[in-house]
Image (spheres, rainbow, N blue to C red):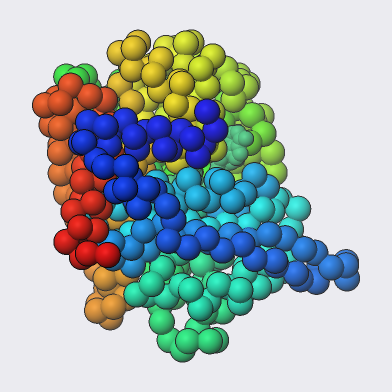
Amino acid sequence: MNAVEAARWYFNQAADLMGLSQNMRRLMLTPKREVKVQIAMEMDNGEIGTFLGYRVQHDDARGPMKGGLRFHPEVDADEVVTLAQLMTWKTAVVNIPYGGAKGGIAVDINLLSRGELERITRRFIDNIHDMIGPDKDIPAPDMGTNAQVMAWAVNQYEKYHGFSPACITGKPLELHGSQGREEATGRGVVIVTEAVLNKLVKPLAGSRVALQGFGNVGSFAARFLHEAGAKVVAISDVAGGVYNPEGLDIAALSRWSSEHKQGVTGFPGADSITNDALLRCDVDLLIPAALGGVITEEVAKDIRARVVIEAANNPTRAEADEILHKRNIVVVPDILANAGGVTVSYFEWVQNRQHFNWDLARVRKELDRVMVDSFDRVWNIAQEKHVSLRTAAYIIGIGRVGRATVLGGI
Ligand code: NAD
C-alpha cells in the first residue's frame, strides 16, 4: 500500500466503525484544492534552475487551513495530498480551530547555497501568495525548512499584502515568532510519551530509547527525553547513526552534529549503527522522527520496542501497523504524537492577531494541557471501543470534522 492508500485505509477503518456514509467519506477525503507550480530561478552559477512546488488545501470545515512546507527531494503530489489530509485530522484531534493543508518543493537543500535557498523560497511564495493568508491557509516549517525560511516567506508575502505576521508560523522570535515554537513538536512528543508510559505503569526515567532523525523534532525530543531521565541509546540522521548502550550525551552530540558536516556519525564514544538497524534496536521506546514509510512489514516483525511514538508524519506503513497491533506494540499515532508543533503554531497565530506576546512558561503550560487532554481523550476512546490509539484518534478527528461539515452545510 502506498502512502495515499494507507491514509485512506486508516480513515476507512475509523469510518467503518462510525458508520460514515460513502458520500461523506468522498467529501471528507477529496482535497478542496491542489496546486502544482513551476519555480524557475537563477542559480549561483548563472544557469536556470527549474523546480516543482506544491500546495494542497485539504479541508477548511473547522477553520483556515494549516500545514508545513517541506523542502525534500522526495516531495511529490501524492505525498503532499497525504500529509495535507493528516493535518486535517491532526488539528481536529487536538481541537484547534484549523483545517489541513501541506506544501513543499521537490529539492535537495544540501545542493543549494544560502542565496539559492532564499530565492527558491521567495519564488515559491510569488506563486502561491494569493491562496495563503491568515484567514485562508497558514504555512509553517517542516522537513528541510526552518525559522529563517519562514522569515523569507513572510517577507515575500508582505510585499504583496502588507504587514501580516499571522500569514505564516514558525517565524524567528525577532519577526513575530512565538516562544517555544521551535521546541514544540519535540516537547509534545515527550509529553505524550510520558502520558502513554503513565497508562502502561512504566516510568520514563531509565527507559531506553532509539530515535531516528536529529533535526528540529528529533533533537528537541532527545533533549527533553534526556532531561526526563530516559536513556537515549541510538540516534541517526540521513548519513547514519550512533549507538551507546549506556546512553548518549545529547548536549555533546548536538554540538558535534552542528560542527560536523556529516551530522551525528563519527561522534566519539559511540558505535556506528545504520538507520535500518536502529529501528530494530533492543529498546523500550522507538521514535521515528525523520521520513515517512520507514516502518515496513519486515521492520515491524523485528521491532523490539514495546512502544512506538510517531514523531515523524506517516512513518508506519499500513501493513506494518497491523503487525504492530497484533504484536501488542503500542503505537502513538502521528496525528496525536507530533501535534505539539501545530498547537504552538496556533498559539503563535493567536499572539500575532492579538499583538500580545506570551512568555515561554505560558506557552509550555498551554501546550502541556492540550497534549495531555488530547492524549487522554484518545486513550479513553481506544479503551472504550477496543481499538488502537490510531483508530481512536481518527474517530475523534473525523467526528469533529464531520460534525463541522454537516453543521455548516454544503
Ligand atoms: P528536519 O529537516 O529538521 O530534520 C529531519 C531529520 O531527518 C534530519 O536529521 C535528517 O538528517 C533526517 N533524515 C532525512 N532523510 C533521512 C533518511 N533517509 N533516513 C534517516 N534520516 C533522515 O525535519 P523535522 O522538522 O525535524 O521533521 C521531521 C519529521 O517530523 C517529518 O516527518 C515532519 O513531517 C515531522 N513533523 C515536523 C514538525 C515540525 O514542527 N518541524 C511538526 C510535525 C511533524
Q: Quadrant of residue 45?
A: bottom right
Q: Is residue 74 above or below residue 273?
A: below
Determine whether, in the image, residue 130 is placed left or right of residue 16. Answer: right
Q: Position of residue 285 (x, y in %)?
A: 37, 22
Q: In percent of the image, x 48 and y 73: which residue is there?
A: 131
Q: Is residue 143 above or below residue 171?
A: above
Q: Position of residue 155 (x, y in %)?
A: 53, 79
Q: Position of residue 381 (x, y in %)?
A: 15, 32
Q: In percent of the image, x 24 and y 79: which residue is there?
A: 354
Q: Is residue 272 above or below residue 228?
A: above
Judge whether residue 382 can be spotted in this image. Answer: yes
Determine whether, in the image, residue 261 is placed left or right of residue 242. Answer: right
Q: In percent of the image, x 75 and y 69: which residue is there?
A: 40
Q: Quadrant of residue 363?
A: bottom left
Count of picture labels: 0
Q: Position of residue 135 (x, y in %)?
A: 34, 75
* Nearer to us in this view, 296 or 17: 17
Q: In percent of the image, x 55 and y 72: which residue is there?
A: 128
Determine whether, in the image, residue 125 is placed left or right of residue 329. Answer: right
* Nearer to us in this view, 111 or 330: 330
Judge whether residue 346 can be spotted in this image. Answer: no
Determine whether, in the image, residue 93 is placed left or right of residue 83. Answer: left
